[in-house]
Amino acid sequence: MEFKNPLRRAVVVSCIIILAGVIIVIAPFALGMDGFGGGFALAAGGVFVTMVGIVSAVVYGLLARKLANILTKENILARWTYSPQQWQQYTEQEHKTDWRERKGLFLVIAAITVIVGIVFGFITGDAQFAIFFVLGLICFVGIVAWLTATANYMRNKRHPGEIYLAKDGAYFSGQFHYWGGPGSHLESAEYVEVPEPLIAVTYSAVALNGANSYNVRIPVPPGQESAARDIVERINEAHRSL
């Protein structure tokens, strides 16, 4: 059965956003609205929506093309499938690792927030606001960390155990990780044996809030350990040649 490229849907949605933005730009003048009575403001909002749609369409279009190269085996290093038992084991272990990492980051942020709150309260003399700020930010960060870890866990449970792996990216569990294009950078790729054989990839990619770092842990099926080591070396060679 042909695998449908999931990013093409994002391109279609982006095109719909572009169309909606154009309609918002045209509508005030087509309906005879006074420009200074809200027409210009509405049109400006439409221009913003249109630009967001264009940027999204370009970005997702490029990613969809790259993913198509992987899904059609033009640039593939491995296509692995896992038994339900293997995938379940990976899902549970990945959830524990993911939550442990996020909990560690949460504790660091919480400690920094407490220090900043103490300093702020001391300088301003407003202890009540400082306490409110510290507790509010800690609760917000904690909720975001829990929701993200839970969403990743549920996504792994929902998707089948299958992966497409290339030198510049990987698609598995409903996500496309791409570290070979403009704005992205491969930080490291290594073969890990403990607790289970994994290909661990760390890369950074540009997002709206700056450069984000991503950790991708790809389970290695039994009997594919040698192939996994070779794949890691080929990924690193491709990165060094850039």
Image (tube, rainbow, N blue to C red):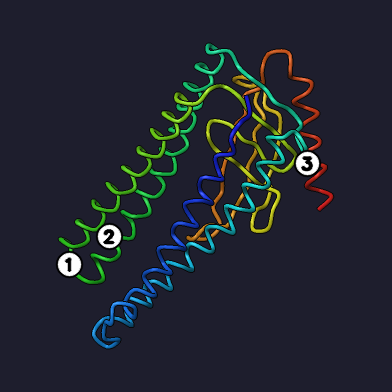
- Judge whether 16 appears above or below 95 on screen: below
- Judge whether 121 appears above or below 231 on screen: below
- Judge whether 219 appears above or below 119 on screen: above
Question: Which tag, 2 or 3, sits closer to the chain's start?
Answer: 2
- Judge whether 32 appears above or below 151 on screen: below
Q: Amino acid at mark 3?
A: Asn
Q: Nearer the viewer, mark 2 or mark 3?
A: 3
Where on the picture, by quarter, is residue 102?
Answer: top left
Q: Which mark is residue 118?
A: 2
Q: Measure the alpha-carbon separation of dots 2 and 1.
A: 10 Å
Q: Which mark is residue 126?
A: 1
Do labels 2 and 1 touch, CB within 8 Å?
no
Question: Which tag, 1 or 3, sits closer to the chain's start?
Answer: 1
Question: Which tag, 2 or 1, sits closer to the chain's start?
Answer: 2
Write down the residue under mark 3: 236
Q: Amino acid at mark 2?
A: Ile
Q: Position of residue 124 (x, y in %)?
A: 22, 71
Instruction: Give the residue at the far bottom of this rendering.
Output: 36
Q: Which mark is residue 8?
A: none
